[in-house]
Amino acid sequence: MKSVEIYTSPLCGFCHAAKRLLNQKNVAFTEVDVWANPNRKPEMIQRANGGRTVPQIFIGDTHVGGCDDLYALESAGKLDALLAA
């Protein structure tokens, strides 16, 4: 399974929803809290091609996007393949 990284902040409902989906699928992920670690936000923005909102989700080298993008992959039946590839 590919590594999963998610940039979050503690008050973000979309962050909680994305983490909930990953947890339901038993996917281990690394969380970077940009609220607690603001020095990591420029890294997130660069990796996300300018994306400034949280969550920003990465599966392996693939930038998935945000929560809606993650759920769209799941709905289309493509998330498991992306995680396994």
Image (spheres, helix red, strand yellow):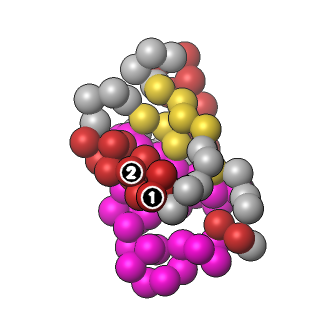
Residue reaching furthest to the bottom? 76
Amino acid type shown at disc 2: Arg
Q: Quadrant of the C terminus?
A: bottom right
Nearer-the-camera pick, 7 or 17: 17
- The spot of residue 12 in percent (x, y) is 28, 36
Q: Secondary structure at mark 2?
A: helix
Kindly report the distance in space between the C-alpha atoms of the residues bearing marks 2 and 1. 6 Å
Q: Is 56 drawn above or below residue 8 in the view shown? A: below
- Apparent side of residue 62 relative to residue 15 in the rendered image (left or right): right
Q: Is residue 35 visible?
A: yes
When the figure is inspected, residue 62 is found, relative to residue 29, above or below; the finding is below
Q: Quadrant of residue 81?
A: bottom right
Residue at which label 2 appears: 20
Position of residue 11 in the picture relative to residue 47 (left or right): left
Residue at position x 54%, y 80% in the image: 78
* Quadrant of image for the N terminus: bottom right
Q: Is residue 65 magenta?
A: yes
The residue that label 1 is drawn on is: 24
Which residue is drawn at the image coordinates 72% and 58% (left, top)? 2
Q: Which residue type carries mark 1?
A: Gln
Residue 36: x, y in percent?
A: 45, 15
Q: What is the span of residues highlighted in magenta in the rendered image?
A: 53-82
Residue 83, percent from left and from top = 65, 66
Q: Element type at marker 1?
A: helix
Name the mark on residue 80: none
